[in-house]
Image (cartoon, helix red, strand yellow):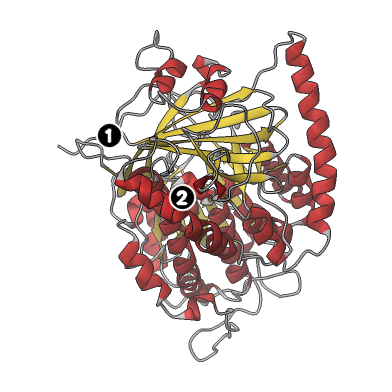
């Protein structure tokens, strides 16, 4: 609820944040502009010692009269903009690809020694798919080949106690109020398809992180084979002021020179730590604060299994609600079902390994404990549908993560001189709406468009501030909605009241019942319509339905093959939620 005042302020904020960028003019009265690139501007990223970096810094500070340089595009004179990107996640790689396509000289610095095929699915909503399509048709087509649509099928909230265990498809009407035989399995269904059709966009779905990562890296390497440096993350920076670039400090002690540094290094960002005066991963004793991020109040367990339920082809994802918790299942393709179990527990209530999303993976608290049985014990009395999914899950595949997010940065810019933050590095959000990666992709697109319109180096700082202004309102609203979704489900929702049984009798049960028509006819349609309202491609006409038709046949064939293999006793491994290779756990510094 901490976001409510912020959201009200944002909704009343000036609409100028969504206005198109004004033309960037080169003022001859304010700066001299070089008509030809200097030899230095043609050099690739330079590496040197820390002492060399400091010497360079001193020279920059002494040469305040250095002329600003022209920045080129294919049809514009000058030299390419040099960009260093900290972090090779979804946002960083997407940003790198679009910038390379614009003709920038881009290098990504990633902390992992080598990318590995670890990781569960990531959701791409219709807004993110529109951005991918606008960035690159080949990228979009390759992602679609690996994509699993969920928004084409029934998605919504189910009653975790009343669902009869048969995975049946029923209506979400309120007939059960007068008809005791009417099923009450489905509480509310989400209008994902209808809202995508409103804008003519592809439907929401999921893609495996390793597949997405592989596609992005390959597309980037087509434009610059050596665009990424692994095992050498960004640790800090020195911004040299207007038009003079930034020195990027690396873990191995070397430095790199660039015009712009993009901090896309995740929730425990080293770039943000310097910009906002934080200590990386430093936590309070109660773990409720960690590097400027606040514990959400929830921990989540995750697992994946192969299971052919009766509704497998008819449902995309389902949210089972009940007292003080909720359980989510999603089809993620090839016969796999991924699930998440959210609990209101104190931070550090650790049971399972933690390691997805690029975080360090450690061991299980009690190696002998069956984590599936533990999670089942927390769902006592719940529908057999939940138990069926859990029983099919290998216990050693279960992982856990405490969820942290941040309040919107309304009073601090995302930019500091020639340095800017994007994605989880500045606006991590709860996973309920699946918008974390989507907003990072939107960031990458907007930032690249603004920098492509930057004709001289003296305009870089101004345009990084313009990026912040363009993104802060929308991102903050999405942060608010993501947090509100969790708070409502756990703190304000309960098993809905019904006149035919005693399963929902608390005041929250009555409140949940009365929420139903508002959620069904007002709140959810408005929410998804707003999320999908950012779509730079415009209406895609018949493309979404064509993509769905091709996918439907491929999805059925792939899933049936896996189900047949399992029935024949063939061992088929489902991916776990972890992204990177197992690495040694990093200790969290604690505030005394």
Task: Say which of 152 and 295 sits in front.
Answer: 152
Quote the CA–CA distance across marks 1 and 2.
23 Å
Percent position of residue 444, x then y: 58, 58
> Does 577 appear above or below 247?
above
Q: Is residue 134 left or right of residue 93?
A: right
Res 346 label: 1
Q: Is residue 220 left or right of residue 14?
A: right
Residue 341 placement: quadrant = top left
Q: Nearer the observer, disc 1 or disc 2? A: 1
Task: Say which of 166 and 444 sits in front.
Answer: 166
> Does 20 appear above or below 113?
below
Q: Residue at x 39, y 35 (%)?
A: 503
> Does 336 appear above or below 18?
above
Which residue has dot 2 on it?
424
Percent position of residue 129, x then y: 68, 55
Mark 1 is surrounded, within 10 Å at the Cα level, by few (under 14), some (14 to 19) or many (20 or more) other residues, namely some
């Amino acid at each position: 609820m901490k976001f409510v005042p912020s959201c009200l302020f944002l909704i009343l904020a000036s609409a100028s944040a969504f206005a198109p960028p004004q033309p960037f003019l080169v003022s001859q009265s304010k700066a001299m502009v070089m008509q030809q690139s200097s030899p230095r501007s043609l050099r690739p990223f330079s590496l040197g010692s820390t002492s060399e970096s400091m010497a360079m810094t001193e020279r920059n500070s002494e040469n305040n009269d250095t002329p600003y340089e022209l920045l080129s595009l294919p049809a514009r004179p000058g030299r390419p903009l040099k960009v260093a990107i900290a972090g090779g996640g979804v946002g960083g790689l997407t940003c790198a690809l679009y910038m390379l396509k614009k003709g920038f000289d881009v290098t990504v610095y990633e902390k992992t020694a080598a990318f590995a095929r670890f990781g569960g699915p990531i959701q791409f909503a219709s807004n993110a798919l529109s951005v991918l399509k606008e960035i690159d048709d080949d990228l979009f087509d390759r992602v679609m080949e690996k994509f699993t649509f969920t928004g084409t099928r029934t998605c919504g909230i189910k009653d975790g106690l009343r669902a009869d265990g048969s995975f049946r498809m029923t209506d979400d009407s309120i007939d059960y109020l007068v008809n005791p035989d009417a099923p009450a399995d489905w509480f509310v269904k989400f209008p994902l398809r209808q809202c995508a059709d409103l804008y003519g966009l592809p439907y929401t779905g999921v893609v495996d992180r390793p597949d997405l990562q592989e596609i992005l890296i390959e597309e980037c390497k087509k434009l610059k084979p050596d665009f990424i440096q692994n095992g050498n993350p960004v640790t800090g920076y020195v911004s040299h002021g207007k038009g003079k670039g930034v020195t990027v400090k690396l873990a191995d002690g070397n430095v790199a020179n660039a015009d712009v540094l993009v901090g896309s290094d995740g929730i425990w960002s080293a770039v943000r730590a310097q910009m906002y005066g934080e200590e990386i991963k430093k936590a309070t004793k109660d773990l409720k604060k960690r590097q400027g991020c606040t514990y959400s109040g929830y921990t989540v367990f995750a697992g994946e299994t192969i299971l052919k339920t009766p509704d497998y082809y008819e449902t995309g994802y389902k949210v089972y609600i009940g007292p003080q918790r909720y359980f989510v299942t999603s089809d993620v393709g090839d016969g796999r079902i991924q699930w998440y179990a959210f609990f209101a527990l104190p931070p550090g209530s650790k049971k399972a390994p933690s390691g997805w999303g690029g975080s360090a993976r450690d061991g299980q608290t009690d190696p002998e404990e069956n984590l599936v049985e533990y999670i089942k014990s927390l769902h006592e009395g719940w529908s057999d549908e939940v138990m069926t999914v859990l029983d099919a899950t290998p216990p050693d595949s279960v992982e856990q993560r405490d969820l942290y997010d941040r309040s919107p940065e309304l009073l601090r810019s995302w930019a500091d001189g020639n340095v800017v933050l994007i994605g989880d590095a500045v606006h991590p959000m709860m996973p309920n709406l699946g918008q974390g990666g989507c907003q990072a992709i939107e960031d990458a697109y907007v930032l690249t468009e603004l920098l492509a319109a930057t004709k001289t180096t003296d305009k870089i700082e101004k345009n990084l501030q313009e990026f912040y202004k363009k993104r802060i309102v929308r991102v903050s609203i999405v942060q608010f909605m993501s947090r509100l979704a969790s708070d409502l489900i756990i703190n304000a929702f309960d098993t809905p009241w019904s006149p035919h049984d005693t399963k929902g009798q608390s005041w929250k049960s009555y409140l949940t019942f009365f929420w139903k028509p508002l959620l069904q006819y007002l709140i959810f349609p408005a929410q998804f319509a707003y999320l999908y309202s950012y779509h730079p491609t415009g209406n895609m006409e018949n493309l979404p339905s064509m993509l769905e038709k091709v996918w439907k046949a491929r999805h059925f064939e792939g899933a049936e093959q896996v189900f047949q293999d399992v029935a024949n006793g063939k061992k088929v491994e489902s991916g776990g939620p972890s992204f990177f290779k197992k690495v040694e756990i990093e200790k969290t510094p604690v505030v005394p």
